[in-house]
Each structure stands twice: as structure tokens, then as C-alpha cells.
Image: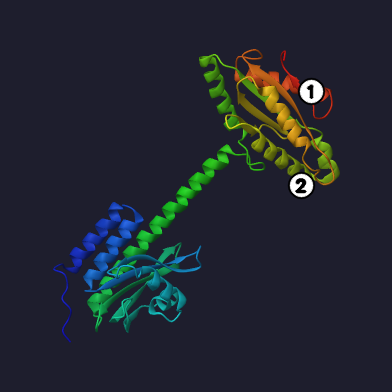
Amino acid sequence: MTERARPDTTPETLLASAVAIVARGRTPEEDLAGLLELATSGVGGDLGSVFLWDAERGGLALAAAAGLPEGTESTFEAAVAADPDHPIARTAHGQTAILGAEGAGPDGRSMTGTTWPLRVAHDGVEEPIGALAISRAGAWAVSEADTTLLAAFADLIAITVDRARLTAMASERAEWVERVSHTDALTGLANARTLSRVLELEVARASRQGTDLSVILFDVDDLAAANDAAGPAAGDDILREVAAVLAETVRLVDTVARWGGDEFLLVAPGAAGLIVAQRVLDAVAARPAIAGRDYSVSAGVARFPADGASPDELVAAAGAALATAKGRGPGALASAGPV
């Protein structure tokens, strides 16, 4: 049988080009497409594809294709995913190469295909990630040189896929760490450290622009009693419910955070602190009981610059006003200065 004509390149040149693609590391899609084109042309193939396990879809997904007739990608992907006896599916499952399998191509032509497993290793444990498939029109006697080249390209493709996934995981992890560092785990609101920085910026801006700024400290009334009577889980539910009210009620320009165990702090640009605080108190009072217990919040309001010229002074003034409010009974509101 006459061997199919190869591109005017040696295996060494092909692999050098492939290594260059991996080393430069452009986008994962570009790298995968470039490696597949080289692998397909390197063994004289007409069609090439890379199928990867997709956890979200629960099966094999077409990740890259070379030479597929336009508009056949979805049909080809569905055919592989639906047929466990398809050579690509068998290789992806069993991680065993299949050489010279005859069958019909996506366009109906008689083709001979070769599939090669894709896998990566972490801590000495191999993980199957999919399969590389290359087909020729007509017959194809797969040579030792073909298998050597396919094995090398399968490893490079697996490395490229693994690197992309690890990069995505690292990015997701960094985003999670960033989010957690700014967020209170129980309520989902900003945490005290984040709001401290916001308060510094808002005080500086109000000072620069000569505008008012309101700081409101909320405290859940008798939360300790709720914990004692109904358990800590009920107390946590109350805190989450109050946090939800705050998130829903405050204005877009306001910033709210969990400030302490049962306290929340709100930074509200402008002089409408009392109005915003009363709106929150009313909204909390309208919520249904939790574990058979009604709950409420009290609030103290301080205003820049009348009640303090620095973040610490404003928080202290709001705290003093809150103490006054709590002395009046549950659900009360007080201001640090004249209304």
C-alpha cells in the first residue's frame, strides 16, 4: 500500500513547532487548535478532533476540531457522546488507543480513524481527560512513526489542557480568597475591615467636598436571649434576616457591613441618616418571627462633621447614640446630635 504523502516537514520540526506553541501559551483555545492542526497534518490526516470530559455536562465534549465540514461540529459531538461504542468514546473511557478503525466520517465518507488517550498525572496518579482522534479518507495503515508522533502530541495536548484548567482553578481560588477577605461569612455583607476602609474614603471625600455623611450603628435587640431560648442557630437566622433587610433597604450609594457580633454599621453619604435608619427599623419590625420569637434592632446615628471629624470619632458618636436608643427600649432610634 502506498503511504500517504506527508507535509514537507520532519517529525522533529513538527514537534519543535508544537513545543513552541505550548511554551508561548497564548489562549487555551488557540494552543489546542494549533497542536491539533500539527498533529493532523503530521500523520497525513484529513480530520482531527479533541474530546474532553466535561464535568458540568457529564460527558464528552468537542474541544477542538480540524478539517470538519462546516456545520457538522454539533452533530459529530452528539454522535460521540451518545454512542459508548464509538472509537473516541471507547478510548476516552478505556484509555486505550484504537488504530485503524474504519467507519463513516461526519460527511458520510468512508474513513479510517485512529484514537489516542489523553491523560495527565498528579502526585503519581493518572487522570483520564479525553481522547485525540485523527482520520483519513479511505484506508490507513498506521505506522510506528504515526503512533510515536500521536503519542507525543497527545502528551502535549494533555499538558495544555491541564495547564488551562489549573490556571482557571487558581483564578477561581484567588477570586474566592479576595471575596472572603472582604465578606462576612455568616451574613454575606462586607466585613468590618472592608467598611473601615470605605469609611475612611467617604470621610475624606465629604471633607474635600464639604458635604454631609451619616454613620449609623445598628444592634440586634436581646440577641443573647434568643440564643439562650432557641439556640445559636436561631440567633444566626436572625442575624442573616437583619442583614437581608439592610441589603434590601439601604440606597445604592450606601455601604453596610457586619461590624461586630450583633452589630451592623452603615455609611450613608448625605444628611438622610435618620430617614435611612428608620426605614431599616420599620422593615425589620415587619419581618415574621424566627423560631417563635419576634426580633428588632435599635440604631444610633452620627453625622459628619457635626458629630465627629474622623472615622473613629464618628463610630464612637454613633455608638453613644445607640446606647441612648437602647435605653429607650427595643426598636428605638437616637441621634448623636440635634436632629
Q: Residue furthest bottom?
A: 1
| In the rendered image, the vertical position of residue 155 relative to residue 193, given as above or below | below
Secondary structure under tag 2 reads helix
Q: Report the residue marked by disc 2.
A: 233
Image height of 64 relative to 248, above or below: below
Q: Position of residue 125 (x, y in %)?
A: 46, 66
Compute the Cα span from label 1 to label 2.
Answer: 27 Å
The image quarter containing residue 151 is bottom left
**In this image, 284 relative to 210: left or right?**
right
Amino acid at pointer 2? Ala
Which amino acid type is marked by label 1? Answer: Ala
Please identify the quadrant where the N terminus is shown. Answer: bottom left
Residue 228 versus residue 86 in the image, above or below: above
Q: Residue at x 39, y 56 (%)?
A: 164
- Please identify the quadrant where the C terminus is shown: top right
Residue 173: where, in percent of width, then height?
Answer: 50, 48
- Residue pointed to by mark 1: 325
The residue at 29%/70% (across/down) is 69
